[in-house]
Image (cartoon, rainbow, N blue to C red):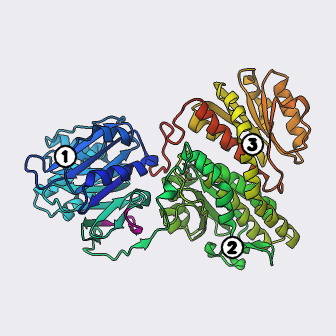
Amino acid sequence: MCGIVGYVGPQQAAPVLVEGLTRLEYRGYDSAGIAVLNPRSTAHPSRVVRAKGRVRDLEAALPARLAGTVGIGHTRWATHGEPSERNAHPHTSYDGRVHVVHNGIIDNFHALRSRLTADGIELTSDTDTEVVAHLVARELAGGLAFEDAVRAAVAQIDGTYALAVTDVQNPDRVVVARNGSPLLLGVGDGEMFVASDAAAIVRHTSQVVLLDDGDFASVTADGFRTFTADEEQTARAAVTIDLTVEELELGGHAHFMHKEIHEQPESVERMLSGRLDDRFGTAKLDGLNLDPRELRRFSRVKILGCGSAYYVGQLGASMIEDLARVPADAEPASEFRYRNPIIEPSTLYVVVSQSGETADTLFAVREVQRKGGTVVGLVNAVGSSIAREVDGGIYLHAGPEVAVASTKALTHMGVGFALLALALGRVRDLSFADGKRIIAGLRAIPGQIAQILGDEEDLAGAAKELSEAPSLFFIGRVRGYPVAREGAQKFKEITYRHAEAYPTSELKHGPLALISPELPTVAIMPADDLLERNITAAQEIRARGGAVVAITHPGVELGDAATRRIEVPRNEVELDPILLTIPTQLLGYHAAVALGEDVDRPRNLAKSVTVE
Ligand code: AGP
C-alpha cells in the first residue's frame, strides 16, 4: 500500500507532485520519490529524485530548480526490498527511458527478474516493481507505441497493481494501469492528474474518473483516453467528489488523530440524520438494497473485516444477536477468504471497512459473490472499490480519516451496526418500544461522546501512567471484549507498547501468571449483569499487585477493585460499548504523545492496506 500521484499540464510538476504525496503519506511513508520530464533539456530529459523516509525528506533532497510539467511520484510502504533510496520509486529502465511508480505486489517478479538478468539487464533494486520499467522499455525498443508497450508489459505480470509510467520519448503524457489497487484520474482545466486517492488532488479539482480493475489510461494535458487489454477505447465518465482541502488540514489540532477523535459528536450526528424512523421505531437504510422481505429471509449474519474493523464487527455481531435474535459472528476477512468458506444463500454477509480498499476484505467480497452469496458493506470512503463492488451498503459518513490509527470511523461502524441490527430486528420480533428505545439511545450518543471528551485532561493523566509500563492488558466480557480488543489495538499501534486483550474470564486460565505491579490492566466494567463477575476478576488482579484502570459507569461501586476509574455516561446496554471505546482512543493517543511518538504515522503501518 503506497501512494501514487501524476501530473500533466502547464504547472511545474514537482510542487504538485510533492503536495500530492504529502496528502497520500498515510498510505505509506518509509521512502518517496518523483520523476519529472523536461523535453526542453537534452542533458536531462528526465530527472528522478528519491529519498528514504518521509515526503519532507524527499522535499529536502530536491534540487533548487527541477523544471518540467509532466511527472509521477510515489510514497512507499515497503513490500519487497527494505526502505532505502535505491528501493524507492520511481524505478527506471535499463536505457533510462522509462520511469515507473507502483502500488501493489507483482507475484511473478522472481521469474521476471531472473529472465531479465539472464538477458543481461542489470537490476539496481530489490523490488518487484523495477521489472515493469525494463519490460516497458523492451516493448518500446521492439517498436510498440507507448500505450501498447505498457499494455504488453502488463500482460507479462501477475499480481495487483496501480501503475503510472512515463517515457522520455513521449514527454507529453503519463500512462496508467489498474488491477486490484485503487487509482483515479483528476480532470482539471487544461491539466490532468493521476492519484491513488482524491485527497492528493482535491485542491486542484473535484472532477475524478474512478478506474476499474483492467483499466488503462493515457493522460495528456487536454484529456484522457481509457482502454483495456482488448479494447482501444472505453467510456469512463468523471464524477464529482465531496471533499474539501479544509477537511484534510489539522484545523488547529496537534495531530489528525486528535482532530478526528474530537470530530465524533458532530460526525455521528451527521451519520444519523435521516436514518432514524420514529414512526416505525426502526432505521431507514435504503442503500442496503434489501426490502423487508429480503431482510427477513436471512437466518444468519456473517461479518468480515480486518484489524480494528474486525473488532467492531464482533461488537456488531453481538448487537445483531441482541436486537434481531439472528445468529451472527465476525471473522478476519483473510482467514475467511482462504478457508474455502461454505457460502449459504440464507446468510447475509457484511463487510466493514474505513478505506474500502483493504485487499483482504475486497477479496472476501469477491469470494462471497463468486459463490452466489449476498454481501453488503459498511464503508466510509465514498466511491472506493468495496463500496462499488458490494450488493448494497451503509455509508458511514465519518468524513476523511487521515490518521493511521482509526477512531471516528470505528465509532461510525459501531453506530452503523446498531442501525443494521435495528432494521433486522424490526422486521422480526423486536418491539416498537424497543425500537424507540434504541433510537433514543442512538440520538444520545453524540452528546455523550462530547461529555467523555470533556474529561480529556483526566484521561491524559491516566494515559501518562499507562505509557510508563512496558506492557499491559485490556480485559472485557461479552460486549466489553471487543472494546478491550480495540483498546489494546489502539495502544499497540501508536505507542509500540505490547498491549494484549483477553476475555476477562480467560485470565485465570493462563494470562494471570503475568500480572505484577509492572503490568497494569485496563478493565471494561459497565454497569450490566456481568458487573459482579468483572469486579471479582479485578480483585484477583489487585490481589497480585496489578494496577487496574476501570472504564465504567457513574454510580458503580468498585471498592478496591480498581486503582483508577474512568466514567462514561450510560446508554442502552446494547449501545454502551460504542461509548466505552472512546476513552481507549484518548488513552492510546495521550500515551503516544507522552512517549513522543509519531501519532499519525506509526512505524511499519499504513492507513489503507491494499496488498495481501
Ligand atoms: C486501525 O486503527 C488500523 N488502521 C487497522 O487495523 C484497520 O482497521 C484495518 O487495516 C482495516 O482497515 P479498513 O477499515 O480501511 O478496511
451 above or below 380?
above
94 to the left or right of 471 = left
Given residues 565 and 457, the one toward you in this image is 457
Callout 3: SS: loop
Quarter location, residue 484: top right
The reply to whether the residue tagged 3 has its Cβ within 8 angstroms of ligand 1 is: no
Q: What distance separates the C-alpha of mark 2 from that of mark 1?
A: 52 Å
Image location (x, y in percent) of residue 104: 38, 51
Instruction: Determine whether the residue tagged by mark 1 lies in a helix, strand or loop.
Output: strand
Measured from the top left, where is residue 474 in percent x and y?
A: 72, 36
- The residue pinned by badge 1 equals 47
| Alpha carbon distance from label 3 to label 2 | 30 Å
Q: Nearer the viewer, mark 1 or mark 3?
A: 3
Q: Amino acid at mark 1?
A: Arg
Q: Earlier in the sequence, mark 1 or mark 3?
A: 1
Picture disc at residue 455: 3
Say what amino acid the circle numbered 2 marks: Gly
Q: Is residue 99 left or right of residue 390?
A: left
Q: Residues within 10 Å of mark 1 (few under 14, many from 20)?
A: some
Q: Is residue 290 left or right of residue 18?
A: right
Question: Is 209 inside the magenta-drawn segment?
Answer: yes
Q: Mark 2 packing: few (<14 Cα in 10 Å), some, or many (20+)?
A: few
Label 2 secondary element: loop
